[in-house]
């Protein structure tokens, strides 16, 4: 039979294939399964590496976005202080005094103390919001935390007396509500968690690591926090 294989040869070849498969088919199938698993694992590892790189780049982009936004906010705060330098020079008192006595940011001997106090109240509240934004944005981001924690420390040193005075004022509001029998509604301006953050200097490093920046509703109840402080009544 020209131009092809003899039928008898083809039959012999098919018989050899069937014999081989009968003897080794299970092993071949097992090898195929193992090979398939190897390819799946290898493919999963490759995709995991790709996703890790994607998330790293995404995290870096988020860090950059947060940094830029905080930087613009801080630049505006400092710009206002350039126009009104007294905003960076409030009267400073001890923590005990700020929590137990009426606080005024400027000396009563200053003829412009009243208008300066109005300006400073608005400015200090802006700084408070800025520091709370830092705490919120940086809590889970070590690089941002390391960058902005010193800023929190510097601004706290300048405005701490006002911060603590506001915490005291909130306590006095709560006491007045109890005495008058009216329901007490906490101010939305000053989150209790951030009050704890400020009072306890939780942005500072301890043993080479930052203290916990986490807080939430279960972190500490307002009444518990207030009882932990030495408040004084109005004078």
Image (cartoon, grey):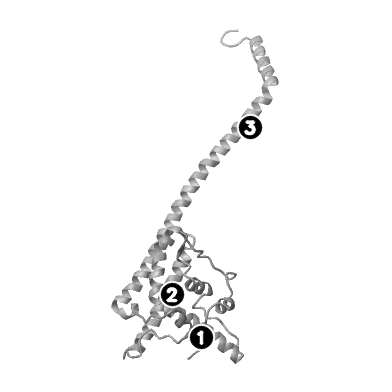
Q: Mark 3 points at which residue?
A: 33
* Crowd class of label 1 (few under 14; some 14 to 19; many from 20; radius 10 Å): some
Q: Position of residue 228 (x, y in %)?
A: 55, 77
Q: In this view, does 48 lie above or below 60?
A: above
Q: Kindly identify the residue that appears in the image at 36 percent across and 69 percent down.
A: 74
The residues tagged by marks 2 and 3 sit, at their Cα atoms, a distance apart of: 62 Å
Q: Mark 1 points at which residue?
A: 232
Q: Which mark is residue 100?
A: none
- Give the CA distance from mark 1 to mark 2: 23 Å
**The N terminus appears in which quarter of the rendering?**
top right
Q: How crowded is mark 3: few (under 14 residues within 10 Å), some or many (20 or more)?
A: few
Q: Residue 38: where, in percent of width, then height?
A: 58, 34
Left or right of 111 in this view: 218: right
Q: For numbered disc 2, what is the local secondary structure?
A: helix
Instruction: From the top left corner, tell me how far across and down residue 182 is, in percent.
Output: 60, 89
Regarding residue 84, the answer to whether it shows in the image is no
| Residue situated in front as seen by the camera: 109 or 122 | 109
Q: Earlier in the sequence, mark 1 or mark 3?
A: 3
Q: Name the residue under label 2.
A: 128
Residue 27 drawn above or below residue 95: above
**Exactly how many numbered labels are in the figure?**
3
Q: Give the mark nearest the N terminus, 2 or 3.
A: 3
Please name the residue shown 39% across and 72% down the image: 155
Where in the figure is residue 25, as x and y percent of width and height? 67, 24
Give yes or no for contact between labels 2 and 3 (Cβ–Cβ under 8 Å).
no
Q: How far apart are the alpha carbons under marks 1 and 3?
A: 77 Å
Q: Name the secondary structure under disc 1.
A: loop
Q: Residue furthest top?
A: 1
| Image-based side of 9 in relation to 176, left or right | right
Crowding near the residue tagged with mark 2, few <14, some 14–19, many ≥20 C-alpha atoms within 10 Å:
many
**Residue mark closest to the camera, 2 vs 3:** 2
- For residue 132, say whether it is visible: yes
């Amino acid at each position: 039979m020209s131009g092809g294989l003899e039928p008898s040869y083809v039959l012999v070849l098919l018989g050899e294939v069937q014999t081989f498969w009968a003897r080794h088919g299970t092993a071949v199938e097992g090898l195929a399964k193992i090979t398939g698993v190897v390819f799946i694992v290898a493919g999963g590892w490759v995709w995991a590496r790709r996703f890790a790189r994607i998330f790293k780049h995404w995290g870096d982009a988020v860090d950059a976005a947060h940094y830029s936004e905080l930087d613009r906010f801080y630049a505006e705060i400092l710009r206002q202080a350039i126009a009104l330098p007294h905003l960076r020079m409030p009267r400073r008192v001890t923590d005990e005094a700020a929590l137990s006595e009426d606080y005024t940011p400027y000396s009563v001997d200053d003829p412009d103390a009243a208008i300066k106090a109005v300006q400073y109240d608005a400015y200090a509240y802006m700084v408070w919001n800025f520091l709370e934004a830092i705490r919120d944005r940086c809590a889970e981001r070590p690089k941002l935390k390391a960058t902005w924690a010193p800023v929190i420390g510097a601004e706290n040193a300048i405005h701490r007396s006002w911060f603590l005075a506001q915490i005291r004022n909130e306590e006095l509001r709560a006491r007045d509500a109890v005495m008058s029998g009216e329901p007490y509604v906490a101010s939305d301006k000053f989150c209790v968690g951030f009050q704890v953050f400020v009072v306890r200097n939780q942005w500072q490093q301890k043993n080479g690591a930052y203290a916990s920046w986490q807080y939430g509703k279960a972190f500490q109840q307002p009444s518990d926090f207030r009882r932990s402080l030495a408040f004084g009544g109005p004078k």
